Every structure is written in C-alpha cells, then in structure tokens.
Image (cartoon, rainbow, N blue to C red):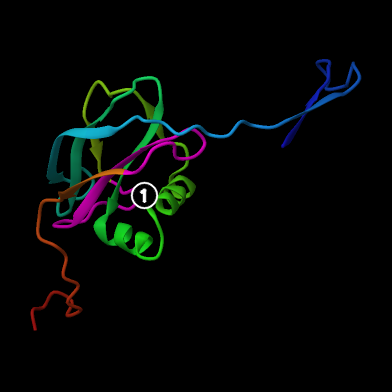
Amino acid sequence: AYTIYVFGMDTKGYRTTAVSTAKVRTSEVKKSDMTISFEGVTAGDEADSQDFFKRNYYVNFTPVPTKNDEYYFVGLVSATDYEFETAFGSDEEFMSSVISAAGENCFLGKPSAPLKGQLDYKGNALKPGTKYYIIAFGYQGKATTPLFKQEVTTTGEAETGGGNGGWGF
C-alpha cells in the first residue's frame, strides 16, 4: 500500500494549501498469454575501435512478441550463469534476479531493426566461443509470461584459462 500526498506550493517552495492524502494499493500483475520468439539470430565479431588487438563479440537478433501492446524484457545470459541460477531455483526466480540486476530495460512491440547484443544482462562483455541464451519475458512490474529462450554460441575460440600466461607449457 502507498500513501499519496498532494498540496499546492508557490514558486518559492512554500505550501499554499492544506495537505491531502489518499491510501492506494497497486493492482495484482496479470499474467499474459503473449509469447516471444526470435528471428535472424546470428553471432559475429568485429575489431574493437579502441583496441586493434581486441575483438568484440555480439549476437544479432529480432525479438518477435505475439502482442504489440505489452512490454517485455529481452537480453542475453551465458548458459553457465543460467544453469547456475536455476540449479536450485526456477525460471520465475531467475526472471526476478534478472529484473533486479538489469532494471526496467523493456521493449514494446517488434523492433524496426535487429538488436545487437554485446553484453549479457549483468553488463559483462560477451566471450568468444561461449554458449548463451537469448532470453525474453513479458514484464509489467514483474514477469507476466514464462521465460522464452534460444541458445546461440558466439564466434571465436573459447577462452581456456590454462593459467600458463599464454606461454604454452
């Protein structure tokens, strides 16, 4: 429940009327039957404009919601992060953690051009040769649909993390 406070104020910030209040409650979020699919999913990489020796990895895709008048969240998550987050939880708990981490970065309707994802929903750059999920779900203060996801693997060789400093021994 919330309390709304309303009163008049002049240009100097002084109150000019009595304070009125009203107690209100937001309505329950309604579930939606919207579904979201993905078109034109392609992975690629390009030279970093700031660092000639660095590559930036990305995934292009177009989310296609079945309803154009409902908001939805869309993003990328590494398969490892998704599997870790849902190992002892559910997709619903995962969607709540996505909302907490990413905020209200939502879309309405099908975008006019493909999206180019270079970061996961936590803001981390995509890694080469890594399995990710494109994720989407309806959103109206909280998730309104099930989680929709499609697997995609970035281009390039996966980082091995051998710990030998790249010297090969």
* Left or right, 54 with reference to 96: left
Name the residue at 13% across, 46% down: 45
Q: Does the magenta stretch include residue 139?
A: yes
* Helix, strand or loop under label 1: loop
Q: Residue type at mark 1?
A: Gly
Is residue 8 depicted above or below 129 in this figure? above
Q: Give the residue at mark 1.
A: 123
Residue 61: x percent and y percent?
20, 35
Instruction: Where is residue 137? Give x, y as percent.
Output: 36, 38
Q: Is residue 135 left or right of residue 69?
A: left
Please tell me whether residue 76 belongs to the stretch shown in magenta. Answer: no
**Principal secondary structure, stretch drawn in magenta:** loop
- Residue range (magenta): 119-147
- Between 18 and 13, which is closer to the camera in this rendering? 18
- Determine the residue positioned at 24% across, 52% down: 126
The number of numbered discs placed on residues in the rendered structure image is: 1
Q: Nearer the viewer, residue 125 or 47?
A: 125
* Residue 154 placement (x, y as % from top left): 15, 51
